[in-house]
Image (cartoon, rainbow, N blue to C red):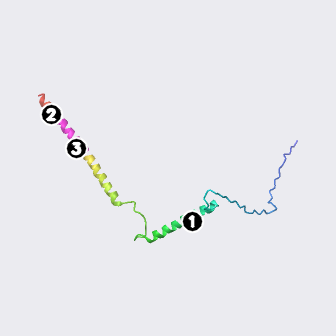
Amino acid sequence: MASFLPSFHVSIKPPLRNYTRQAVHIRAQSFSNEGKSSNIVDANLSVLRDKVEMLKTNERLERCCKCESGWNYVRVYDYKLKRDREISQFFEFVGIICGTLGFTCLSGIVCLCLVSFFVHLFQ
């Protein structure tokens, strides 16, 4: 006996009608902004325009006050300060080494003197 499985035929057709969507006007109103703007988008745009205008003004001022090399930035990396710091660290390191060697020699001399003193004392 042969059994036939049901076959499913699915056809995907594009819609016959072209839907034209009309823009939906949504307006958010807020009465708590004291009459500045009834639309929050307009208020945000006005704030954005103010900030852009402030940035343009700052850029104009920076262009007027450029340094001789053409760059207008605050020097953060100071070579002299770094060199002075490295020199002070080097002398601190040398001081630690000399102090350690000096303490070692001094403690050795003190121990030799004590041993010599006790040897002469018991003879």
Residue type, label 2: Ser
Q: Nearer the viewer, mark 2 or mark 1?
A: 1
Where is mark 3, residue-wise? 102
Where is mark 2, residue-wise? 116
* Circle 2 SS class: helix
Q: Residue at x 51, y 68 (%)?
A: 56
Where is mark 1, residue-wise? 49
Contact flag, marks 3 and 2 (Cβ < 8 Å): no
Residue type, label 1: Arg
Contact flag, marks 2 and 1 (Cβ < 8 Å): no
- Look at the image and give the residue range highlighted in magenta: 99-114
Instruction: Compute the Cα span from label 3 to label 2.
Output: 21 Å
Q: Residue at x 12, y 31 (%)?
A: 120
Residue type, label 3: Gly
The spot of residue 34 in percent (x, y) is: 60, 59
In the figure, residue 122 lies in which quadrant? top left
Q: Residues within 10 Å of mark 3 (few under 14, many from 20)?
A: few
Query: Which is more N-terminal, label 1 or label 2?
Result: 1
**Residue 113 sits inside the magenta stretch:** yes
